[in-house]
Image: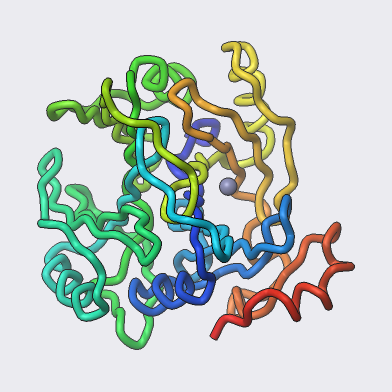
Amino acid sequence: MENHILGFHHVTAIANNAQRNFDFYTHVLGLRLVKKTVNFDDPSTYHLYYGNEEGTPGTILTFFPWEGIGPGKNGVGMATEIGYSVPRDSLDNWAGRLREFGVSIDEPAERFGERCLPFVDPDGLSLSFVVSKTTDDRPAWETADVKQDIATRGLRSVTLTLQKIDRTAKVLTDIFGYSLLAQEGNRYRFMTDAIPNASIVDLLEEPKGQLGRNAAGTNHHIAFRVANEAVQMEYHETILRKGFQITPKINRDYFFSLYFREPGGVLFEIATDNPGFTVDEPLEKLGESLRLPGQHEALRTNLESTLPALK
Ligand code: ZN
């Protein structure tokens, strides 16, 4: 399975205020900030990475907090919900905790036999806590308030809302090695068995749905995971051969990336496990200080005084 897509690597979304984003994900949800860096393509903005202790691929949610950006709108051509795996029997505790912090939550629902609790983050990003039918033994990061009994294990699923699902489905099945697991109404569940978790993509077909608008509270891209650059470059060739435009390999310091837009409109990335988040700071100190890529190191003094300090 080494040479397959190994589920998700990370998911990236857009936020408005960095401090509010940091408080919500580290304090309310109990994730670890595993990297505090800048958007390599727009270094005046943070790029914040939240995950488990090591920032294991498949546990990572990242944000570009663009202060002052208006609210976006979920719609077709977008990833419209991010599902986190949580322990069995934790949903009631989570509902209580989210309410305590004034988080807007939806009625618990059941999808494909799995209980889930949908809610939104302070920018309106749609998330869901899901109790996986299969065992999820990924180690969780613990905080003072969020212990093992409720802590998230990492990503479980991502929902893409599309006008038509067929061409996106073909990317998943013919290129990424996913298969259609089940259908409930207009929701089609695709899964890879290359990895036990972070393995589900739901395609929601809405032929009359409105286009989404990318701004705060919406998804920016979905990164799929590969073991290394050799596998990544095989995908580069396959995707080109299927007639898509795809970027060359880009060095993101913590992984290498390729980007292409799937036919339904969602930006897909293929990211490597190597080298990982401990490449420029030790495990115990992940996320504590501002890390800059070499090309932006000259901006450090300026960035340290203009980027908001996160407390
Ligand atoms: Zn990415």
**Is residue 83 toward the left or the right of residue 113 in the image?**
right
Quadrant of res 285: bottom right
- Is residue 23 shown above or below 115? below
- Is residue 145 shown above or below 274? below
Q: How is the image coloured?
A: rainbow
Q: Which residue sits at x=65%, y=35%?
A: 258
Q: Give coordinates of residue 57: x percent, y percent.
A: 50, 53
**Is residue 18 toward the left or the right of residue 233 in the image?**
left
**Is residue 283 toward the left or the right of residue 1 in the image?**
right
- Is residue 279 shown above or below 270? below
Of residues 49 and 191, which is closer to you in this image?
49
Q: Give coordinates of residue 273: x percent, y percent.
A: 59, 49
Q: Give coordinates of residue 14: x percent, y percent.
A: 50, 55
Q: Which residue sits at x=28%, y=56%?
A: 85
Q: Which residue sits at x=68%, y=33%?
A: 230
All told, the count of numbered labels is: 0
Quadrant of res 260: top right
**Quadrant including the C terminus:** bottom right
Q: Give coordinates of residue 52: x percent, y percent.
A: 45, 67
| Residue farthest to the right, as pictured | 298
Q: Which residue sits at x=19%, y=55%?
A: 131
- Is residue 88 shown above or below 267? below
Of residues 68 and 93, which is closer to you in this image?
68
Of residues 138 and 297, which is closer to you in this image?
297
